[in-house]
Image (spheres, rainbow, N blue to C red):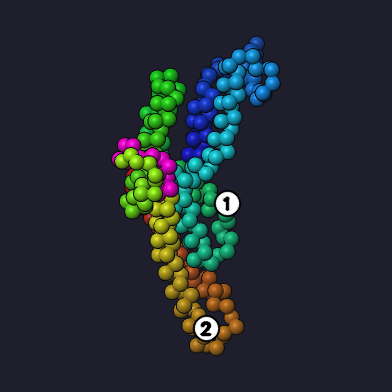
């Protein structure tokens, strides 16, 4: 999803040109890119191109944050972090594996939304059937619908009340600066709720092991060291990864 968004933003700001594959007697045309404020820009179009380039590079630097704030990535990465802490496996699985799994699950969950964007906004824009502003409007609609389905009414009403504008908001005209923070705190609450439920079985194992060690007088032996194999055994027996991934995917309204 991140690469798809990066591709679309590049298209959005710089337009697109299709070139045929170079033959033996042809060379691939390379566009000239320059950013300058000197006298080399002789026409207003040169200044516009430079500004578009600067805006595009700025948006690309913010793209990871945008993808995190407006997709299912937040809930998934927080839940997987809680799972690793509940099991007490320290750095197993490592951060790279957890992040990669969260990214691909996000792509899977967001695929219906992307298909809508690709059909209604990206393809018409590439075919020059709509303008950039119309494409941007069509992109916002499915993203807003996805976030509204996952946002609690209480959180949404909070930011509506905190907003100082006087207009009444509806589903169609809900501004992004209101729905994005509401969506974020709703995702965090849901992730913390799932994390609490994940902790319960592993906490019970820790308590049982600690009680047994205490009754045997082995107070110097860390209970975590003894309970670790039993936690892993429980997780394997219930096919934990299957249950976690299934629960995360089904927790989103598709």
Q: Decide: few, some or many residues near mark 1? Use Cα within 10 Å; few <14, some 14-19, many ≥20.
A: few
Label 2 SS? helix
Query: Label 1 belongs to which residue?
Result: 96
Q: Which quadrant of the figure has residue 58?
A: top right
- Percent of width and height locating residue 78: 48, 56
Mark 1 vs 2: CB contact within 8 A: no
Query: Label 2 belongs to which residue?
Result: 213
Examine the structure image and report whether residue 230 is included in the region drawn in magenta: no
Note whether 133 is above or below 162 in the view shown.
above
Q: CA distance from mark 1 to mark 2?
A: 35 Å
Identified at 55% across, 40% down, the residue is 62
Identified at 37% across, 28% down, the residue is 120
Label 1 SS? helix
Identified at 33% across, 46% down, the residue is 149
The answer to whether one can see residue 246 in this image is no
- Percent of width and height locating residue 100: 53, 48
Note whether 134 is above or below 103 in the view shown.
above
The magenta region covers 169-183
Q: Nearer the viewer, residue 33 or 196?
A: 33
Q: Which quadrant of the figure has residue 127?
A: top left
Q: Earlier in the sequence, mark 1 or mark 2?
A: 1
Identified at 57% across, 84% down, the residue is 219
- Percent of width and height locating residue 222: 57, 78
Note whether 246 is above or below 86 in the view shown.
above
The answer to whether one can see residue 81 in this image is yes
Q: Which quadrant would the C terminus be assigned to in this image?
A: top left
Note whether 97 is above or below 197 in the view shown.
above
């Amino acid at each position: 999803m991140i690469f798809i968004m990066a591709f679309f933003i590049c298209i959005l700001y710089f337009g697109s040109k299709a070139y045929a594959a170079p033959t033996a007697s042809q060379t691939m045309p390379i566009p000239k890119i320059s950013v300058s404020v000197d006298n080399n820009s002789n026409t207003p179009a040169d200044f516009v191109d430079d500004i578009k380039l600067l805006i595009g590079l700025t948006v690309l630097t913010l793209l990871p944050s945008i993808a995190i704030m407006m997709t299912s990535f937040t809930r998934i990465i927080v839940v997987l972090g809680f799972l690793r802490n509940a099991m007490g496996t320290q750095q197993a699985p490592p951060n790279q594996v957890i992040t990669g799994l969260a990214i691909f699950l996000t792509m899977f969950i967001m695929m219906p939304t992307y298909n809508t964007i690709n059909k209604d906004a990206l393809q018409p824009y590439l075919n020059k059937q709509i303008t950039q502003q119309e494409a941007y409007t069509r992109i916002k609609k499915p993203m807003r619908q996805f976030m509204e389905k996952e946002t609690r009414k209480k959180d949404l009403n909070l930011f509506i009340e905190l907003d100082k504008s006087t207009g009444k908001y509806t589903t169609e005209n809900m501004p992004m600066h209101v729905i994005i923070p509401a969506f974020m705190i709703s995702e965090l609450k849901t992730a913390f709720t799932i994390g609490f439920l994940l902790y319960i079985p592993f906490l019970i194992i820790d308590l049982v092991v600690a009680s047994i060690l205490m009754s045997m007088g082995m107070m110097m032996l860390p209970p975590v060291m003894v309970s670790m194999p039993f936690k892993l055994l429980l997780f394997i027996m219930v096919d934990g990864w299957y249950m976690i991934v299934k629960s995360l995917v089904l927790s989103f309204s598709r």
